[in-house]
Image (cartoon, grey):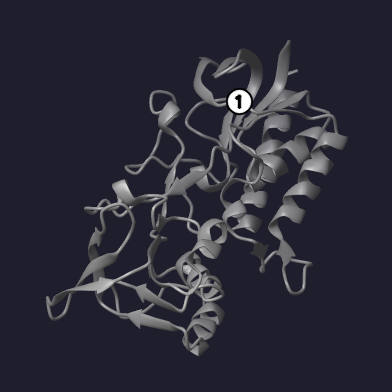
Amino acid sequence: MIYDLIIIGGGPAGLTAALYAGRSRMKTLLLEKAGLGGQIILSPTIENYPGFAGGVETAELIQAMRKQVEELEVEIRYEEVNKISGASGLFKVSSSEAEYQAKTIIIASGACPKKLDIPGEAKLIARGVSYCGTCDGPLFKNKEIFVVGGGDKAVEEAIYLTRFASKVSLIHRRQELRASKILRERLFENKKIEVLWDTVPLEILGDKVVEGIKIKNLKSSETKELKAGGVFVFVGIHPHTQFLRDLLKLDEIGFILTDEDMRTSLEGVWACGDCRRKTLTQVITACSDGAIAAFNANRYLEVKK
């Protein structure tokens, strides 16, 4: 079978692309290596998705997206894609389970959290080092923990973790947070949170579990070791694009370069969501990307007829 479209990735971008492709009656296959939802499953609630005053539960939103897609007879398979070959008109997609053919491709492979790459981090992952407060927060009840980062995600998770921790210290390398104003307001109002300005982590301490953290103040150059029950890291993302390095033009970090229509450097291939270079990574912008990519993939095939 030759599909009209294969979508790689099942986060908000990929699911929206599948929705628009299905509505265009394109024969579509969506391949997702793990579970649907992408990075947003790391947050329990989406507060800034239009139409949901007070927010919407992440699981509820993804379930609704999945239902929409399946009702349009889009095929979903849980397989990891490791290679794409071919050219415009007929691509071969090789996964962990099989090989598929498609006339067009949409890459929505998403991204994963960046690591600090400091001593102690790697060996203590899942032993007090975490990249998901929603997943692991309940394990840190009544502990003093540290959150590293200064963007929306770091601040959002720091606030969330106060539900469990006795104290949350936010480590930020600058004097001003990058997070949105409303999140900053909530952070500063929370008496369980302390912000360590102009500070970077140097080492995560502990043998079998996290026991402390070594930090440095960038202005005074003072270093100190503090007791810690856990360290949560939110310093950005890395795109899942390793399998595309010989196929598409990527930036120096690995994000896919596209135009405003989500076209990549290879004819017949589009990219959407967190895997492409963009200024704002939000659920709503991922959905917008997915809709644009699917619209243009369908228009491309219509012209080719």
User: Residue 67's quadrant in the figure?
Assistant: top right
In percent of width and height, residue 293 lies at 65, 39
From the viewer's perspective, is residue 144 above or below residue 272?
below
Q: Is residue 188 left or right of residue 21?
A: left
SS type, badge 1: loop
From the viewer's perspective, is residue 91 above or below residue 79?
above
Q: Amino acid at mark 1?
A: Glu
Q: Residue furthest left?
A: 221
In percent of width and height, residue 128 lies at 39, 58
In percent of width and height, residue 182 lies at 56, 81
Q: Residue at x 57, y 55 (%)?
A: 42
Q: Residue furthest right?
A: 71
Q: Residue at x 45, y 67 (%)?
A: 154
Q: Residue at x 54, y 37 (%)?
A: 109
Regarding residue 265, the answer to whether it shows in the image is yes
User: Residue 248's quadrant in the figure?
Assistant: top left
Q: Which residue is mark 1?
A: 79
